[in-house]
Structures are given as structure tokens and as C-alpha cells.
Image (cartoon, rainbow, N blue to C red):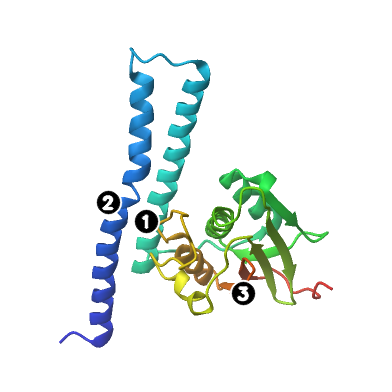
Amino acid sequence: MTSRAETEALRRSDVLKTTLLRAMSHDLRSPLTAIMTSASALAEAELLLDDADRRELSETILEEAMRLDRLVSNLLDLSRLDAGAISTQLDVSSIDVLLAKAMDAVQAGRRIDLSLPDEPVLVHADPHQIERVLVNLIENALHHSPATDPVYVRVRWTRSEAFVRVVDHGPGIVPDELEQIFEPFRRGSRTGGVRGAGLGLAIARGFADANSGRVWAESLEGQGAAFVLALPLAERRLPLE
């Protein structure tokens, strides 16, 4: 006889498979179409293109290919998290180094207003997984902020935890949705025309949980949203004043 837990696990697996197929048919097709269209234009011998046109088409191919790579990586990560197949390689890492790598990955250094403590803050976590958490949180904030506004990233700590706060200038989050947006394929009602598969926040929380950390969202009416990552410190220290 199948237990209730086993039945629920099977139901979740079926839902995940169905939703993955929907995401793959929609969200994977968009970058693929852009890549194929741009590549076809570059390969068309009879189409006269100047250097600026070729550069724009090449940049489109690269940008969409990177977007496709991130989406595939997110799908794989979500599948592993759902199956409990994620293993963490704990190490001592500096938050400023992890943030630098994450900012390089999203290629948006000029749009980030970063504030770090005077001395390094060391955390005990899997550096690769936490880098992915930071990439997803920063990328989410960039997507929901106007291009002219910076995204604020602040690092603080208590005696036992380090906190990374990522603040955007977007439309904010409805109070009832502060937890729902961390569910796979769930997006807030105020996303407007911002595209996305709704995977980044779910993966960020999954990796944070796997590293004994926490991720949550905060939002006040009329303001943007803040996403906070809390991680265990590698060593206890006095709280930051």
C-alpha cells in the first residue's frame, strides 16, 4: 500500500514534469528563435550587412545563448533539488568574493550599488551553490528595476550569521505572495511584462536551505522589494554596529 508521503511525492513529481514540459516548450523556444533568426541573417549571402549590423546580430546570438544556458541550468538544478540529489561541498568562503563572481556572471557591475564591511565576512557554505543563489537574486532584482536605477546590495552580520540584502526599484510584491514566489514556476502578480520562467527564486531558496541558510522577501507598499540571504558564519564575531 502506498503511503500518503509517497503519494504526495508522486503527485509533486508529476506536477513538476508537466510544468517542466510547459516551460521548455515556451521559455526555451524564445531564445532559440532569436538565435536561429540572427544566425540565418548572418549566413544569408544575398543580405547586405554592415559591420554594425553584424555586430548586433552576433551580440544577440551570444546574449540569447547565455540566457538559454541559464534556463537549462535552472531546470537541471530544480530537478536535482526536487529529487533530493543535491550534495553540498562545504568550505569557508568570503562573501565579497562570492558577490564579485556573481556580479561578473550577470555582467551588470555598473548597475550594482555594493556596500561591504571593512573586513571580509567569511561564511561556511558551498561556494558554487551560494554563487548561484546570489546570481539569481541579483538577476531578479535587475530584471524588475528600471535600467536607470541601481540595485542595492548590502552585507551585514550578527554573531552567527551573515546577511546579503538585495534591494530593487521594481513594483514590489503583494504581501500574500511573499512566500508563493519561492515556489517553482510561480511569479508575482506585479511582474508586468518582465519575462521569466519563475525558477530563479525557487532554486535560490533550495540552495540556501541545502547550506543551512535562509532566503526570504520583504516589500512595503509603494516601494520595491528586498531579498535577503542569511548564511552561517565561519566564525563567531561581534555584531556589526
What residue sits right under mark 2 in the picture?
25
Looking at numbered disc 2 in the image, what kind of residue is underneath it? Ser
Looking at numbered disc 3 in the image, what kind of residue is underneath it? Glu
Query: 147 above or below 232?
Result: above
Say the numbered circle drawn on residue 221. Answer: 3
Answer whether labels 2 and 3 touch (C-beta < 8 Å): no
Density class for disc 2 (Cα within 10 Å; few <14, some 14-19, many ≥20) is few
Q: Secondary structure at mark 2?
A: helix
Residue 127 placement: quadrant: bottom right
Q: Is residue 12 left or right of residue 171?
A: left
Query: 63 above or below 224?
Result: above
What residue sits right under mark 1 in the picture?
75
Residue 148 place in picture, x, y as percent: 66, 48
Q: Earlier in the sequence, mark 2 or mark 3?
A: 2
Residue 233 seen from this side: no
Residue 95 place in picture, x, y as percent: 68, 59
Of the pair 110 and 222, the residue shown nearer to us: 222
Query: 179 above or below 164?
Result: below
The residue that appears at 58% across and 53% down in the rendered structure is 142
